[in-house]
Amino acid sequence: MGELLDFFLHIDVSLREAALAYPVATYGLLFAVIYTETAFFPLAPFFPGDGLLFAIGVLAAGGLIHPLIIIALLIVAASLGAWTGYRLGKQFGPAMFKRFEWLDRRAYTRSHAFYRKFGATALITSRFLPIVKALVPFVAGVAKMERGRFARYNVLSACIWVISLISLGYFLGNVPFIRDHTGLLVIGLAAIFITGLAITAITKLIKGRAVS
């Protein structure tokens, strides 16, 4: 845990050292991280996600990574990751409900109705929520969201997510305070998203108990 915290606190230093020592391999590593975080939701809590994109923007502002190449590469990674999660949900999700009787089938039914009505919105907004960004494509597959519709909004959401956060880091990367405290900003960014997610979940839980 200490090593993970140290990585977050010094993510700018770690990325800078990697880009200087292994410039080509760094692109491949970043691709793998974004793909894995988006594709496999059980692994999502262990990946930096949003903060990493911001840190990449800061690094690009320093000239160590080409901004256009990394943006294009990570859009592909995020799109492929979500597509993998969607395919896993579509192939294995329904079988889980049949095999494990303790799973709530009402949730399965509600997921179908939800994605028929709000699937596109969920795909776009979930990109900015840790863990949820990987869970939503899986649930979309379970709910059998139309493949063409999922593909369109998957790519759109990946573009919005990657471009906005990398651009934010890029244009703020030369501000001395941000450049010198990138690690703390990454943790702060993650904390904001997680806090918002927790507040939303608690609010829904309270409302649900009030109704029942």
Image (spheres, grey):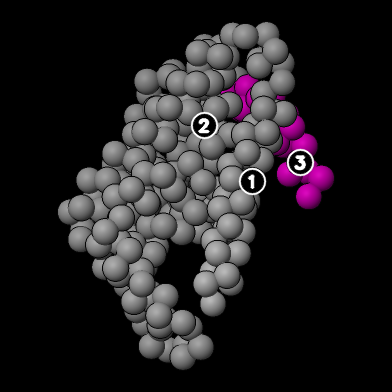
Q: In the image, what residue occupies the spot 73% across and 44% down?
A: 4
Q: Nearer the viewer, residue 7 or 131?
A: 131
**Residue 90 in view, yes or no:** no
First in residue order: circle 3 vs circle 1:
3
In the image, residue 172 above or below residue 145: above
Helix, strand or loop at label 3? It is: helix
- Please state which amino acid type lies under the numbered disc 2: Leu
Q: Quadrant of residue 136?
A: bottom left
Magenta segment includes 3: yes
Residue that numbered label 1 is attached to: 195
In the image, residue 139 above or below residue 197: below
The magenta span reads: 1-19
Residue that numbered label 2 is attached to: 53
Magenta segment includes 109: no
Q: Quadrant of residue 55?
A: top right
- Please state which amino acid type lies under the numbered disc 3: Leu
Helix, strand or loop at label 1? It is: helix
Which label lies toward us, 2 or 1? 1
- The majority secondary structure of the magenta stretch comes to helix
> How many numbered marks does the figure carry?
3
Residue 6 image point, x, y percent: 77, 37
Residue that numbered label 3 is attached to: 5
